Amino acid sequence: MYIIVIGGGKVGYYLSKALLGEGHEVLIIEKDATRVERIEEELGSICMQGDGCEAATLEEAGTERANLFVAVTDEDEDNLVACQVAKHKFNVPRTIARIGNPRNEALFKKLGIDVTISSTNLILEYIEQEVPTHPLTHLLELKKGELEIVEVKIPPTSTAVGKQVRELPLPPGSFLSLIIKEEGVQVPTPYTTLEGEDRVIAVTKPELEQALRIILTGG
């Protein structure tokens, strides 16, 4: 495959090195001239200096023939813009973006990025497997922070298990919008029964997050 990598930092460097080792054609686009020089010294002529967010740079890089486009700079905004330009202007079939702030993940997916990689969320998921806690996860802010979309995983020991949605004393103005179960995703009705390991997507006010978490997790 022809793979374009935006960002020649440590992530971009080691990713490209691994892809080259697997026999792929790789091009790194990096703004910093010093990084470009270092990469070419170590990996060969696979790096060009330029801004991966600019259409002219991507055109010069032959993005229209790329099979995969990966943006791994330290700036979420740059990664989002670069992937959008690649997908919508050059019709790249698959885009992957690195995300520093987990709150941006829902926005990236909403805007059409195929795959998002959040190192923070990956670490949190690992911790969740190792430590028996079930934190509330922020997904998206609405109305300039007046409302938030959050995800709560219901532990098997929660007092909410076995209850119908209508039986839950939800905080004022809060509601459950989706329930992700092993068998699929459901839009809850007042008579939907909650089960252990369900992932609940809810809308609430920031100041009511803790109350919502306690109701759904039992602690």
Image (tube, rainbow, N blue to C red):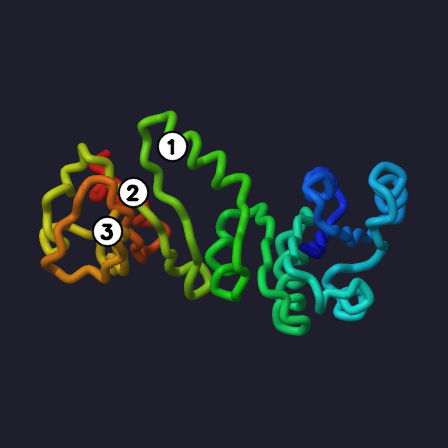
Secondary element at image label 2: strand
Residue 145 pos. (x, y %): 44, 59
Instruction: Judge from the rendering whether residue 115 lies leftward or rightward of residue 194; answer left or right.
Output: right
Tell me the residue that label 3 is attached to: 183
Tell me the residue that label 1 is attached to: 128
Residue 125 pos. (x, y %): 42, 36
Q: CA distance from mark 2 to mark 1?
A: 10 Å
Q: Residue at x 23, y 59 (%)?
A: 186
Q: Residue at x 72, y 63 (%)?
A: 53
Locate residue 140: give its quadrant.
bottom left
Q: Earlier in the sequence, mark 3 or mark 1?
A: 1
Tell me the residue that label 2 is attached to: 153
Label 2 close to label 1 by CB (< 8 Å): yes
Q: Residue at x 80, y 51 (%)?
A: 30
Q: Residue at x 18, y 32 (%)?
A: 157
Instruction: Judge from the rendering whether residue 11 lies leftward or rightward of residue 151; answer left or right.
Output: right
